[in-house]
Image (cartoon, rainbow, N blue to C red):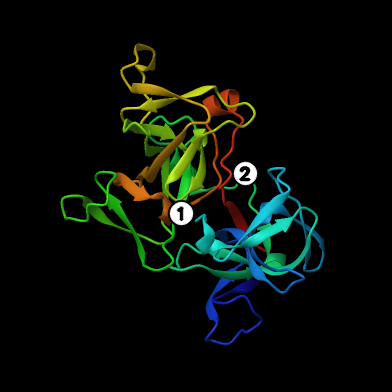
Amino acid sequence: KATLLRREPDQDHTAANAMRIVKNGETVAGDFMYVRRASREVGFIKVRHLEQQCGNSFLVRNDDNSTTTLIRKQPTEVLGEANTVGYAAEGEMLTGEWVFVRHKDERRGGYIKFAHLRAKADDEDDPAVRLAAFDGASMAQRWAVLDAVHDGAWLRRAPNSDRSERNLLGLVPNGTVVAGEFVHVRRAGGEAGFARFRDLEQLSPKAWRVRTSKGALAKIELRREPRESEARAVGESVAMTVPAGEQLTGEYVFVTTGRKVGFVKRNYLTGLSTKPSAEASTTSGSRSSTAERALVVS
């Protein structure tokens, strides 16, 4: 059996709306459900913030214990007024049927009915998990490249906007899974370095705050290079420490494609679920708030 991947979230199953047939057992990636409010406003909410009641009815149950949940205009991690419909109150009833997902063989995302998807079990084979365990990172974050306007995102040699041949390493196609743990950030005083993604809370496309959530450290290490270091005790890899709550700026994440390493803009990366290493499971209970779920068509 199989289900249809659609261009638009509606019942139209004609060739104009059909992207491909997805067989049962295939894996797709997605975290946003297309929902409608009682006021008839429509938008996208992360599935983890929704509790199914019956059929297409869902109750807002924020997974982060917030009293409101962001409804986005587009199914992306981009924050800001341009991508905000409004905020749903805790306990608000919504209707929804379609989840925005990406298929590895499609450049752009599409829609599959929520009823035809199930969460992927942790022990199911996933080549991307092996890709994520690179460079000694204790909890490598996986990302899917997604630029809603273009066919992919530029991989850069340095974390800046230089688009010369000297800095551009190539275009990473939409749907490609990459792995990267470090964000290039800058302090208000101009000092720059690399911070672990899991130690940051994103406030806007270029603004970050050192995490102050329960269990977070009072300060984090800002590294000279985007990597863990065996010489950490000597302090050779640590440029400085930054206290919790301090705001930083930055827009580039250091990633590997499996063949190349470089920097990609955070706006063009959608977080996938992280699978911590043995070290991380004993030292950190944190999980990215932008983690996207792997789903199996059923």
Neighbor class of circle 1 (other Cα within 10 Å; few <14, some 14-19, many 20+) is: many
Which of the 4 quarters of the picture holds residue 240?
top left
Nearer the observer, disc 1 or disc 2? Answer: 1
For residue 281, which numbered disc appears in the image? none
Residue at 56%, 41% in the rendered image = 288
Please provide percent x and percent y for residue 7.
54, 76
Which quarter of the rendered picture does the N terminus lie within? bottom right
Which of marks 2 and 1 precedes in the sequence? 2
- The residue that mark 1 highlights is 144
Which quarter of the rendered picture does the C terminus lie within? bottom right
Is there a contact, CB below 8 Å, between mark 1 and mark 2? no
Q: Amino acid at mark 2?
A: Asp
Image-based side of 297 in relation to 193, left or right: right
Residue at 35%, 50% in the rendered image = 264
Image-based side of 193 in relation to 166, left or right: right
In the rendered image, the residue lying farthest to the top is 234
Separation (CA) of disc 1 from disc 2: 18 Å
Neighbor class of circle 2 (other Cα within 10 Å; few <14, some 14-19, many 20+) is: few
Q: In the picture shown, does residue 61 fall above or below 186?
A: below
Image-based side of 4 in relation to 177, left or right: right
Find numbered disc 2 in the image and state the secondary structure of the residue it sits on.
loop
Please provide percent x and percent y for residue 66.
70, 45
Of 14 and 58, the residue lying toward us: 58
Find numbered disc 1 in the image and state the secondary structure of the residue it sits on.
strand
Of 88 and 48, the residue lying toward us: 88
Please provide percent x and percent y for residue 282.
59, 23
Q: In the picture shown, does residue 197 fall above or below 128?
A: above
Q: Amino acid at mark 1?
A: Ala
- The residue that mark 2 highlights is 122
In the rendered image, the residue lying farthest to the front is 189
